[in-house]
Image (tube, rainbow, N blue to C red):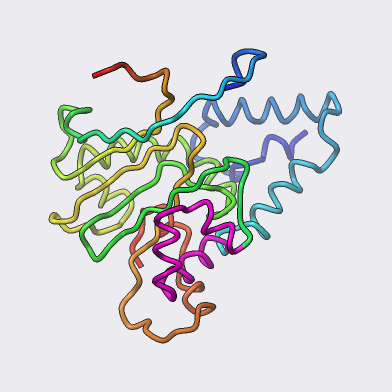
């Protein structure tokens, strides 16, 4: 993560899988969305 | 600077340039004006991507995976290492290959590795469009079918891989029927860029 500061910070990224209907009201069953997210974007469940 | 403004769009573009296209054009103009990039540098990079790096690299990877089950297993296990075996890599560092297996899954990648699947002015323009389609795809299969002309039967699960970090994705398309025994070179010729993004079946 270098774009926003002078310091280089190594951060893990995770591929997080959602069901489409968790994300959108009209999401269809059987559709999953994998999103790559930085560690700092995530909160403990 | 007309060539800068023509960059990435046809001359008779039916819609005005998107904000990202305008930003890219301005950045390119500034970099050139300030002499930060040598003249012709950006054109050369584009030429490399369109002619040399192009989707043929990905097609070779897919053809090898079809022809060699062991390579296929390595590719799905560690995409970065497997494409490096064929001499390919990219600045993103990590590549994940996802398989479109025997009509049970369709994977679609919002952003794939440019070194593997190539880049054209069309694909650079496509960023905003693919986002929109991704949303539409998740919401309505009917819309997907209409927009992409890609028929996905109801019983097929759809997986959308949205890459927003350092990882890029490559879809290994399902091998077309009737291609048994074809040499890798002929197999590679069957692979299209859209099939490696997951928006077309072969």
Residue at 39% x, 36% y: name it: B131
Residue at the farthest top position: A5
Q: Is residue B99 magenta?
A: no
Residue toward you, A31 or B26: A31
Residue at 40% x, 33% y: name it: A36
Q: Is residue A31 above or below residue B20?
A: below
Q: Is residue B68 magenta?
A: yes
- Total number of numbered discs in the rendering: 0
Residue toward you, B51 or B145: B51
Residue at 44% x, 47% y: name it: B169
Q: Is residue B191 above or below residue B12?
A: below
* B166 left or right, relative to B107: right
Q: Is residue A43 above or below residue B15?
A: above
The N terminus of chain B appears in which quarter of the rendering?
Answer: top right
Q: Position of residue A10 (x, y in %)?
A: 55, 24
Q: Position of residue B49 (x, y in %)?
A: 65, 52
Q: Is residue B55 above or below residue A4?
A: below
Magenta segment, prevailing SS (helix, strand or loop): helix
- What segment carries the magenta color? B57-86
* A4 left or right, relative to B183: right
Q: Position of residue B10 (x, y in %)?
A: 59, 46
Q: Position of residue B185 (x, y in %)?
A: 54, 78
* B76 left or right, relative to B142: right
Residue at 32% x, 38% y: name it: A34
* B86 left or right, relative to B152: right
The C terminus of chain B appears in which quarter of the rendering?
Answer: bottom left
């Amino acid at each position: 993560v270098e774009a926003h500061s002078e310091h280089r910070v190594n951060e893990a990224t995770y591929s997080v899988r959602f069901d489409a209907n968790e994300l959108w009201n009209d999401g269809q069953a059987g559709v999953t969305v994998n999103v790559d997210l930085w560690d700092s974007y995530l909160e403990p469940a | 600077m007309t060539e800068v403004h023509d960059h990435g769009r046809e001359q008779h573009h039916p819609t005005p340039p998107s904000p990202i296209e305008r930003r890219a054009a301005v950045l390119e103009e500034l970099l050139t004006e300030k002499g930060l990039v040598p003249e012709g540098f950006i054109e050369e990079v584009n030429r490399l991507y369109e002619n040399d790096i192009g989707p043929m690299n990905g097609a070779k990877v897919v053809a090898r995976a079809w022809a060699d089950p062991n390579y296929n297993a390595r590719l799905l296990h560690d995409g970065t290492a497997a494409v490096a075996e064929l001499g390919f890599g990219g600045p993103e560092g990590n590549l994940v290959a996802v398989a479109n297996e025997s009509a049970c899954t369709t994977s679609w990648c919002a952003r794939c590795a440019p070194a593997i699947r190539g880049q054209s002015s069309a694909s650079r323009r496509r960023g905003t469009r693919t986002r929109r389609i991704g949303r539409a795809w998740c919401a309505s299969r009917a819309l997907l079918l209409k927009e992409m002309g890609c028929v996905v039967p109801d019983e097929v699960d759809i997986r959308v891989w949205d890459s927003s970090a350092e990882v890029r994705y490559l879809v290994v398309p399902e091998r077309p029927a009737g291609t048994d025994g074809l040499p890798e070179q002929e197999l590679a010729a069957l692979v299209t860029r859209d099939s490696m993004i997951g928006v077309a079946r072969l």
